[in-house]
Amino acid sequence: MTHRHKRGAQLVEQLSPGFEADLRSKLGAIAPDFVDYTIEFPFCEIYSRPGLDIRSRQFVTISALVTLGAFDQLRTHLRICRTIGVTATEVSEVIMQLAVYSGWPRALSALTIAAEEFREE
Amino acid sequence: MTHRHKRGAQLVEQLSPGFEADLRSKLGAIAPDFVDYTIEFPFCEIYSRPGLDIRSRQFVTISALVTLGAFDQLRTHLRICRTIGVTATEVSEVIMQLAVYSGWPRALSALTIAAEEFREE
Amino acid sequence: MTHRHKRGAQLVEQLSPGFEADLRSKLGAIAPDFVDYTIEFPFCEIYSRPGLDIRSRQFVTISALVTLGAFDQLRTHLRICRTIGVTATEVSEVIMQLAVYSGWPRALSALTIAAEEFREE
Amino acid sequence: MTHRHKRGAQLVEQLSPGFEADLRSKLGAIAPDFVDYTIEFPFCEIYSRPGLDIRSRQFVTISALVTLGAFDQLRTHLRICRTIGVTATEVSEVIMQLAVYSGWPRALSALTIAAEEFREE
Amino acid sequence: MTHRHKRGAQLVEQLSPGFEADLRSKLGAIAPDFVDYTIEFPFCEIYSRPGLDIRSRQFVTISALVTLGAFDQLRTHLRICRTIGVTATEVSEVIMQLAVYSGWPRALSALTIAAEEFREE
Amino acid sequence: MTHRHKRGAQLVEQLSPGFEADLRSKLGAIAPDFVDYTIEFPFCEIYSRPGLDIRSRQFVTISALVTLGAFDQLRTHLRICRTIGVTATEVSEVIMQLAVYSGWPRALSALTIAAEEFREE
């Protein structure tokens, strides 16, 4: 295991416990290297850079995912938001603002998912 | 002029001096009400809500614009970033992270524009 | 309740009975203001403007939703089409034409949904 | 020249004089068959179908082009709108409504182009 | 049945047995002509052109579908890949490369689907 | 200079002479690490993998770029196509097929650019 992999894997495990194991069970047979790339590039190279705090990084990610309509990945990252202490209100503000830029349909779908993920708060 | 319009117009003028006048000169003949909506909905209703700080709001907007490939509007919002004190480093971190979610082509085009807008720093 | 809200709410109720109540039950906890914005901006400000008839407005909306691949919202608006008397043939013509601009995959998915929504006609 | 080609070519010439010749001069060397397909599929097979009037067809096309951010093709179709008598007001209503579904950035870019194309009205 | 239809239908049946019948059962009531167009335009006019081999054509199609997030159609075309002998490794290489251009979320969703479709290999 | 960087840089230089130097001159001030990532991730990790030949990789990239409407990057990759011996006919076949999946507007814009890039052939 390389240094890059170890650093990425630690951060992923902290943000989203079980993420790497789950990914490896789904993609390990067809694309084992892509599991490694996912740990190494987004999480080691990008997320652990010092120039931007983790909360802001989650706002960026959520904004991209909502705009793309990538709602499966949105669910994963809303859980990361909860883990790092981003509140339901902040998530709601981010998505409402995206109605302006990415349109109402994306915002409505995303808020529906956020309402489910933050239900107990 | 309604209260909503006034509140939005003040915020716009602070973030992007001349924006409303410029928009009215371009769109005033074909869509005068849309100039008002732009002041009233994004700027009065959304941007002036208290639940999220203006820096985070700019990260959200930039992330959506890069993902959409809306590079004219990106330029406007990069200038707003400078006005409110977002640094070139922060903008660069946001766009690098978007390479992961929205792909390299969007990130490369956006960084090229950001390099121009933040040249003198 | 503001005048804007009342006007939007009446139009929504006419086009899509139960829409506001349903939205409030899903999003009321996480984003109550967004429920209001949805009634006030799209429905009061935009849909009730006199410059374009409601049938043409539905063609516009459906075209955007199919192009975005926003199929949940497409279902809602196909029901509005039925409510205001847009025929299965017209919907089918709109979607077939979108194959040219937005590509076959969007058109095939949209026609499959339209076939379900207009089954009994 | 097949019957399909002739029918499509007549309609194109009526909607957008010079379109086929212009397309053939640009793409004739690299993709001559695609010039034919463009005349035959969108214009013969789709646009000349009786189930939807030409004005509604233009609303559909413009909505897809704005949503995609396909602004070169938007310009062509705004000219077709003028040729068939769609007014600046109607175009403006269509694009304002698209702000709701496809987001403000697409709508602002599209209105700027529409303002240029309908300037003299 | 025209010559164009026959040629398209033969190719479809070879690539995706049952495709035309299945499409006709789903869309025959609402858009019977679109079933014909689907056989005639993509399959007769495009796929049976001699200038590009069928394997390369599948790489093109899969790349477009992943980029669009059109995952239902992706499933159909992954099956065509298996029918014509494209391997799980090749599909996996195509999708991993798309992470660069179309972003990680599309690639992760597509690899999950490919893992299901190529499970037994 | 790491081994990964060297391997990526060699491949880039072979496919697109001057690419790294050009990128460093444009982005070196604002995002120097992103220049490295671009050499290391797409070119070292992905393009130099043995499971797919370079011609097929270019078909994948072009298909994604056309679908996204990323026409600046398309130009770069059409030149790479010429460098590695992909013919104008093959490029034209790829883009014509994309009309089916990604729609006519993307295909028309892309063919116009391809006609310019392959003019002298």
Image (cartoon, coloured by chain):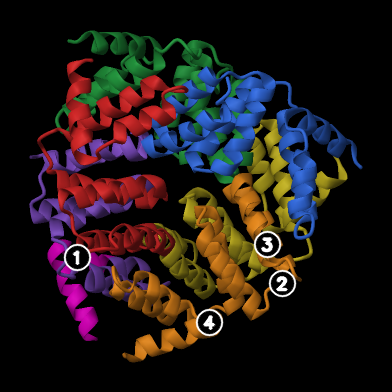
Chain colours: A orange, B yellow, C blue, D green, E red, F purple
Please determine whether, in this image, residue D57 is positioned above or below residue D110. above
* Circle 3 residue: A116
* Circle 1 residue: F18
Give amino acid for label 1. Answer: Gly
Does the CB distance between marks 3 and 2 fall below 8 Å? no
Residue segment shown in magenta:
F1-22
- Seen from the viewer's position, the closer of residues F37 and A13 is A13
- Seen from the viewer's position, the closer of residues B120 and B101 is B101
Q: Chain of mark 3?
A: A
Q: Position of residue A58 (x, y in %)?
A: 57, 71
Q: Are marks 3 and 2 on the same chain?
A: yes
Q: Nearer the viewer, mark 3 or mark 2?
A: 3
Does the CB distance between marks 3 and 1 fall below 8 Å? no
Give amino acid for label 2. Answer: Thr
* Circle 2 residue: A87
Q: Position of residue E76 (x, y in %)?
A: 32, 45
> Marks 4 and 1, how far apart in space?
43 Å
User: Judging from the image, what secondary structure is the residue with disc 3 in?
Assistant: helix
Q: Nearer the viewer, mark 2 or mark 4?
A: 4
* Circle 4 residue: A17
Q: Nearer the viewer, mark 3 or mark 1?
A: 3
4 or 3: tag closer to the N-terminus: 4
